[in-house]
Image (cartoon, helix red, strand yellow):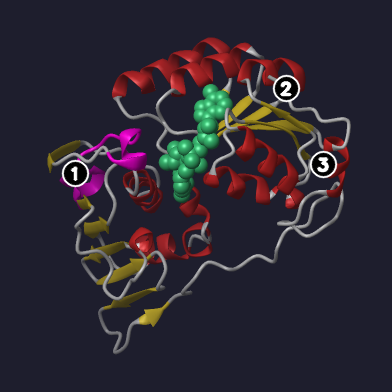
Amino acid sequence: MGNYRSLILGCGPRAHWHAEVYPELEGMELVACVDLDEERLETFAGKFCVPMAFNDYETALAEAKPDIVHIVTQPSNRVWEAQVTADAGVRAAIIEKPIAIVPSEILGLQQVRDESGMEMMVNCQRRYFPQFRDGTIRRVMNEEIGDVYLIRASAKGNLMSMGPHMMDLLLQLLDEAEPEQVWAMAYGIDEEGYKAHHRAPEHTFAEYWFPGGIRVLFDCDTEALGSPGEESFWMHQHFDILGSKGRIYVTQNAGWWYQTEGMAEPVHGRARPSTRSPARCSRCTRAAGSTCRIRSQMRNGMSNVKD
Ligand SMILES: NC(=O)c1ccc[n+]([C@@H]2O[C@H](COP(=O)([O-])OP(=O)(O)OC[C@H]3O[C@@H](n4cnc5c(N)ncnc54)[C@H](O)[C@@H]3O)[C@@H](O)[C@H]2O)c1
């Protein structure tokens, strides 16, 4: 039994990644899931041993009474989702990136937060990858390469797909500094598939001015050059950080290195995020992936699926 009850709204592919970590979380219990799609809902509830499954979000909030909600839907209805979540007395919402598509939605979310006090977090999980999380790159950046004057940030994927990840990592590298100026050029639109809900220019190139005279060239483009040698489209993401005494090259998936004046060879950092062993369900202790024993029993007569 956890101290906090949580609920996941949306049982699409992304939500599986949210649920998988639950067996390892102390003090949190996943008590309910919600999806309009019955098949997705049943598959998800079965796979992750979620005791309550609903088709209707407001009913789910009223009956499951969660403390924490994960909003893992397409980013087309975020203000309504946040409002009904806050109205139900939820204390915190973890919202998948992108948190919003247009500025008025950010203002709407801000208003919900100000009026309700509900915390909202956007899920940009890449900052928790070991090479970014452990602070070594930021230490090298702050202490070993002199004054940083230029960062080239590059990712494939448009502003609403890879853009939130790249900006989040950039701000982490810059100790959450806020830019002072920006100019940008952007063109092209693709509204096929998931991009119908992630409306953004396909091609964006921007230059940011950060405090301390740091310039950032921000290349976020489905046709960006990307990281040389990277084969997966979604893993093209890297940063070149130039300082007055050295430089750092950071990739998402193929490690990082730095070299300062006087060093004959670059120093290499850790290459990849660590892998986790498959999680086990805390309710029926079977390895994740197979159908939950307890959920199967529910389906044989005591299903909690509700409209
Ligand atoms: N952080 C990352 O690296 C990462 C990776 C992939 C996707 N994402 C983001 O995660 C989000 C979800 O992605 P996905 O691929 O799982 O989307 P998806 O559209 O496949 O799944 C979303 C699910 O939510 C359900 N849903 C939406 N509104 C609902 C409502 N009001 N009531 C009940 N069910 C509702 C839909 O029926 C659907 O099954 C998107 O914002 C996407 O950008 C983030």
Which amino acid is tagged 1? Answer: Trp
Q: Is residue 213 left or right of residue 161?
A: left
Front-most of 38 and 87? 38
Residue under the image location 48 percent in, 74 percent down: 270
Q: Is mark 2 within 8 Å of ligand 1?
A: no
Marks 1/3: CA–CA distance: 53 Å
Left or right of 204 in this view: 259:
right
> What residue sits right under mark 1 in the picture?
209
- The numbered mark, 2 or 1, whose residue comes first in the sequence reads 1
The outermost residue toward the front is 300
Residue 88: x %, y % from top left? 65, 14
Depth check: give the residue in front, 55 or 301.
Answer: 301
Q: Is residue 215 above or below residue 287?
A: above
> Is-magenta flag for residue 207?
yes
Start-end of magenta stretch: 192-217
Compared across the picture, whether 60 is left or right of 122 comes to: right
Which residue bears the numbered disc 3? 295
How far across and down, in percent of the image, does residue 24 sit?
74, 52
**Residue 106 in the image: x percent, y percent?**
37, 23
- Look at mark 2 in the image and give the residue it sits on: 306
The span from disc 2 to disc 3 (Cα, nearest Å) is 15 Å
Would you say residue 74 is visible in this rendering? yes
Q: Is residue 248 above or below residue 150?
A: below
Is the Cβ of the residue at disc 2 closer than 8 Å to that at disc 1? no
Residue type at mark 3 is Arg
Please say whether residue 199 is one of the residues in the magenta stretch.
Answer: yes
| 226 and 10: which is toward the camera | 10
Q: In x, y percent, where is residue 30?
A: 74, 37
Q: Secondary structure at mark 3?
A: helix
Callout 2 crowding tier (Cα within 10 Å): few <14, some 14–19, many ≥20 = few
Whether residue 113 appears in this view of the structure is no
